[in-house]
Amino acid sequence: MTRRFVVAGMLHETNTFSPVATPLASFFSRTSALGPQDGPMLTGQRAIDAFGHVNVAFAAFVAAAREAGGEIDVPVYANAAPSAPTDRVAYDTMADAIVEAVKRGCDAVMLDLHGAMVAEGLDDGEAELLRRIRDIAPEVPIAVALDFHANISPALAARADIITGYRTYPHVDMRETGERAAHTLLARLEGRAAPFVIHRWLPMLTHMNQHSPQFQPMKDIMGRARAAEASGEVLNASVFGGFPLADIPFAGLSVVVVADGEAGRERGESLADELAEQAWQRREEFIFRLEPMATTIARAKTATAFPVVLADHSNNTASGGSVDTMESIEEVLHQGLEGVVAGPICDPIAVQTMIEAGVGRRITLAVGGRTDMPSIGRKGRPLTLTGTVRAITDGEFTITGPMMTGARVSAGRTAVLDTGTMQLVVSERRIEPADLGVFTHCGIDPLRARYLLIHSRQHFRAGFEPIAREILMVAGPGVCSSDYSQFPFERVTRPIYPLDPQMRLER
């Protein structure tokens, strides 16, 4: 008998301090380059055509279902850039579509989710989605692929049969994460495995600049999880750094192990405890020490090998920022750096002004600073610049780097302002500079720059680290800062490290 699989994606990393709204349209803005679609969502074969070849877990799920000879029902593939909590209409529209597909009948469900989705009235969007599925299909096997920055609650862990997480940051193993989950799910369907989830949560808000598995202290913790899965000690093992910019009860680091039946329970429990204990013992190493922005820019001036990447990590797209703060750009200009390529800054008003002026025109205009950040008491502050409009584009390009390889993305209309010492890329939409295409699509060669000033925390490393001769982390202002003292946390579980640095962990 042909098996039927429901395969869906609903991804959003929610920064509860972000001023950027998240309506339904934001989940499909990345697919605008694909042309008009039927209805408000990307579904069915069109979703497969758009993302079935891309380095994402959804693509792995589609491939696995096909290889198993199954029928595939895709109720939605939705992926919004990080921002404020999803509005409830948007959440229910997407979740209802997935639930309706399950109601039509299926043998298994494969979900490409984020793990840190907050919606209006819901702290845990993923756990709520699985609750709704379980209400109508309590026995259907559910495999879930999650982002490394998932905040995993006991409810989410209890409602999934299989959970795997990205093991890289930048996330270059999205498809591989889906393959791991699908492999275990098919073993479950074929009676070769009896997976169940073991979960450990730690009261730790790690710093995202410090918890990438590329580096210590996370590197060998994740390495141990990788080895345990590869050796067959457990079916799957994942460590989640968590997303700390979410004021919800289960923000924090998690360990998830998928064990095989009662025979594997003891091994799974032991591994989960081992990984969690190792992370807790290293909690001080997960703290990122900030350097004043002016000091970092001054150090950049002493560089002798180029290009130098200046990563302003406090207001980036991939952590929910507005990406229109201009303070780091202002400081670079103030200190007299030359040969600078910067952006993309999100400012539709400035883009329209440059389009109206036209290529080749010299203009003076205000750029950026359009967005207030009430959660941290900050007002937007535009920067007045004078320069020549060098290029105007539609902002569309295909990702060729290792993160989301093959995806067609759109930054909206984009323009380049040349001030003489800086080429500044300004776009209508927020976009994470994880791929060189953010500059090359508008005629800029990053290799010819002395300095590349981008708003990013870690994802820039996917595209820019291979060409960088030096990388400097710039602590500008914004709602993605590593300075947790400026955020009005009210709902996280207390005590929690490092907000409560003297706390003890009780088991």
Image (cartoon, helix red, strand yellow):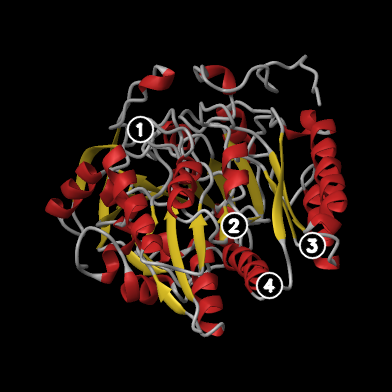
Q: Which quarter of the figure has residue 301? A: top right
Report how far apart the C-alphas of labels 3 and 4 lie in the structure: 15 Å
Q: Amino acid at mark 4?
A: Ala
Q: Residue 120's mark?
A: 1
User: Of residues 129 and 471, which is closer to you in this image?
Assistant: 129
- CA–CA distance between discs 3 and 2? 19 Å
Type of amino acid at the residue the image marks with label 1: Glu
Please state the horizontal and vertical placement of residue 428, each as a whole percent of the image. Answer: 27, 50
- Give how far apart the Cα atoms at labels 2 and 1 are: 27 Å
The quarter holding residue 57 reads: bottom right
User: Mark 2 or 4 closer to N-term?
Assistant: 2
Relative placement, left or right, of 349 versus 452 is left
The label number, if any, that marks residue 187 in the structure image: 4
At label 3, counting other C-alpha atoms closer than 10 Å, the crowd grade (few under 14, some 14-19, many 20 or more) is some
Q: Of label 2 and label 1, which has the lower sequence position? A: 1
Please state which amino acid type lies under the numbered disc 3.
Glu
Question: Which badge, 1 or 3, is on the more N-terminal residue?
Answer: 1
Q: Nearer the viewer, residue 191 or 84?
A: 191
Residue drawn at x 64%, y 28% as measured from the top left? 291
Front: mark 2 or 4 = 4
- Which numbered disc covers residue 229? 3
For marks 2 and 4, give the CA distance: 26 Å
Q: Nearer the viewer, mark 2 or mark 1?
A: 1
Q: Nearer the viewer, mark 3 or mark 2?
A: 3
Which mark is in front, 1 or 4?
Answer: 4
Q: Secondary structure at mark 2?
A: loop
- Label annotation for residue 171: 2
Which of discs 3 and 4 lies nearer the camera? The answer is 4
For marks 3 and 2, the one nearer the N-term is: 2
